[in-house]
Image (cartoon, helix red, strand yellow):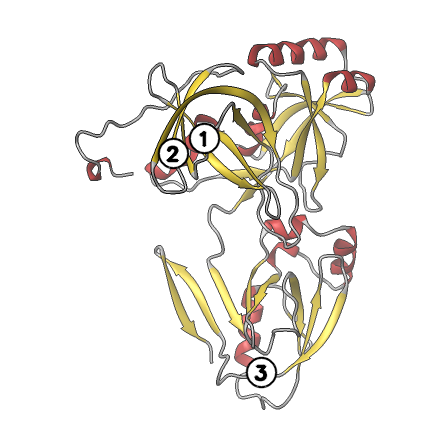
Amino acid sequence: MDKTLLPSLLPIPTISTKEYIVGDPVEVYGLNFSHQLVQRRTEISGIAPLNCPESAIPAWRFINTEGYALLDTPKILSGVIIDPADSSVIALWIEINLGGINKGWLGLDYRYYVQPIIEALKIGEEVNTWSCGCVFEQLHLSRALDLGLPEHNATIINNIARNIGTGPQVVWVHEVFPQSPSGMEVGDFILEIDDEPVGRIADIRHLTSSEFTNAVILRNRETKDVVIRSEQMPSQGPRIVVCWAGAIIQQTPSFALERTGPEFALVSKKEGVENPQSLVYISTCLPGSPANGILGPTQWILQIEGWKVASLEDLLRIIEKLKGRDEKEYIRVKCIGQKGIVSTAGMKLNSAFWPAWVLKRRDGEWIRSELE
């Protein structure tokens, strides 16, 4: 962020370092649907996790994030939550897609979730984020006690809830993705992370900052010391995108593998897939193209004309081999879907109207190159 581009009379807001609780007064600033500035004094009415449900089409979704709910919130597109005492920024007020036409709004804590990204970008570093491949939820303390939560842990969690003005909740593993490196199991309670007690979703944010994290969990009524392993996530989207026969193809995004089941892992192994993350993924097929209606979006290409496709490099080599092929002939393409169903389809190419091309990101710009 270049501060010299801002007017000299415009003050640079500071970032709040306070811990806020339910009932604290705040102010919301934002633009309404007529793009007019709106200001409203209100208060924090809740501190709760926000996990977006899965959509029909695989896509990145909001998970493992805690947000502020506000009392009497204005109807605004987005904005910021300010501490009225010192005008410091508490959170971003953002809109979240909860699936379909359902929308949700929350205050995303700036210090917890946004500032680490900004600080890395300011010094020119990559934004390193780690994922353990789990979705965490909260369970009421009384229910957790019935499932074997020790009394001394219950006391600590109750104190955490009392300090922030919420009901006591225990953080547990609600979902484990198929490619999760964590070693966690559905139903595990997270009691401590790096010797710090866990009593709210914000406490697990430390899992995104390193590959290995020491934790204390409750599994099958037994307390265990474990090391949770996380996997580094790409700091940006795909750097290479290929269009072949009207199909937009990229390296497998993490959110697509999250939607696969055990059948996918079993079948892909039988097909000789060593690394599912390197497979090529069909994100969409352009209307009217040869691939439209033949290849399915959200599928992975395994073979083309019997040649194995294990990476984008394999795909580019095969496209080169197919140059000059009689376009009246059918090209045989073998794909695998999310549920492990393998299908083979025949497709005719059309280089005159649907030539292959590749987009590569270099030095912050997208460079397009024709492949035929």
At x 37%, y 24%, the residue is 15
Q: Which residue is mark 1?
A: 74
- Left or right, residue 315 beside residue 86: right
Of residue 148 and residue 219, the one placed in the foreground of this image is 148
Mark 2 crowdedness (10 Å alpha carbons): few <14, some 14-19, many ≥20: many
Residue type at mark 2: give it.
Gly
Residue type at mark 1: give it.
Pro
Q: Which residue is mark 2?
A: 30
Check whether the beta carbons of the residues at disc 1 and disc 2 lie within 8 A of each other: yes
Q: Quadrant of residue 125?
A: top left
Q: Position of residue 339 (x, y in %)?
A: 75, 57
Q: Position of residue 69 (x, y in %)?
A: 53, 26
Whichever of labels 3 and 1 marks the residue nearer the N terminus, that label is 1
Q: Position of residue 25 (x, y in %)?
A: 44, 16
Secondary-structure class at tag 3: loop
Residue type at mark 3: give it.
Leu
- Left or right, residue 98 beside residue 141: left
Task: For marks 3 and 2, give the one nearer the viewer.
Answer: 2
Whichever of labels 3 and 2 marks the residue nearer the N terminus, that label is 2
Give the spatial CA distance, label 3 vs label 2. 50 Å
Of residue 318 and residue 29, the one placed in the foreground of this image is 29
Secondary-structure class at tag 2: strand
Q: Which mark is residue 349?
A: 3
Residue ranking furthest to the front: 34
Secondary-structure class at tag 1: loop
Of residue 164 and residue 340, the one placed in the foreground of this image is 164
